Image (tube, helix red, strand yellow):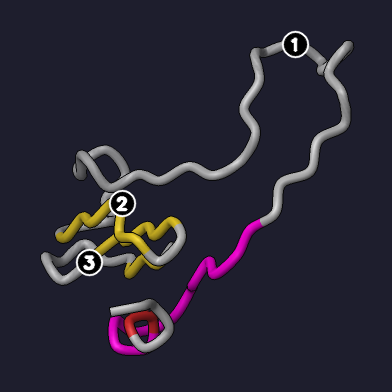
Amino acid sequence: IGSYVTNGNDGFVKIYFNKDLIYDYQGPTYGWGKVVGSEVRIGIYRDGGLGEGYPDQTVHYDDFVIGSTKEEISSVLWN
């Protein structure tokens, strides 16, 4: 997963699965309520309970990219 967070049109979110691009968004990725369509949530989500009765679970992440520039992020992702 690669994401360039900006309120400009040069932002992006790219998600790969086994080197296949499965999600490609280009545009603003920041704006808190002003931007629609760029949210990617990763994790295990539950109902509002206290977790009673849920088994232990492990999530492994591979190649989650965070960078300061689009070029820095893009250099890590597969083209």
Looking at marks 2 and 3 on the same chain, the residue that comes earlier in the sequence is marked by 3
User: Between marks 3 and 1, how big is the CA–CA gap?
Assistant: 36 Å
Q: Is residue 14 magenta?
A: no
At label 1, the amino acid type is Gly
At label 2, the amino acid type is Ile
Tell me whether the residue at label 3 lies in contact with that at label 1, contact meaning CB atoms closer than 8 angstroms. Answer: no
Residue at 26 percent of width and 50 percent of height: 31
Task: From the image, state whether disc 1 or disc 2 is nearer to you.
Answer: 2
Residue at 28 percent of width and 51 percent of height: 23
Instruction: Identify residue for label 1.
Output: 49
Residue at 53 percent of width and 66 percent of height: 64
Q: Give the prevailing secondary structure in the magenta stretch.
A: loop
Instruction: Identify residue for label 3.
Output: 11
Dot 1 surroundings within 10 Å: few (below 14), some, or many (20 or more)? few
Where is residue 21? Give x, y as percent: 30, 59
Where is residue 38? Give x, y as percent: 27, 47
Q: Is residue 1 left or right of residue 32?
A: right
Q: Is residue 71 magenta?
A: yes
User: Between marks 2 and 3, how big is the CA–CA gap?
Assistant: 17 Å
Instruction: Specify the label residue 59 is tagged with.
Output: none
Instruction: Identify residue for label 2.
Output: 22
* Magenta residues, start to end: 61-72
Looking at marks 1 and 2 on the same chain, the residue that comes earlier in the sequence is marked by 2
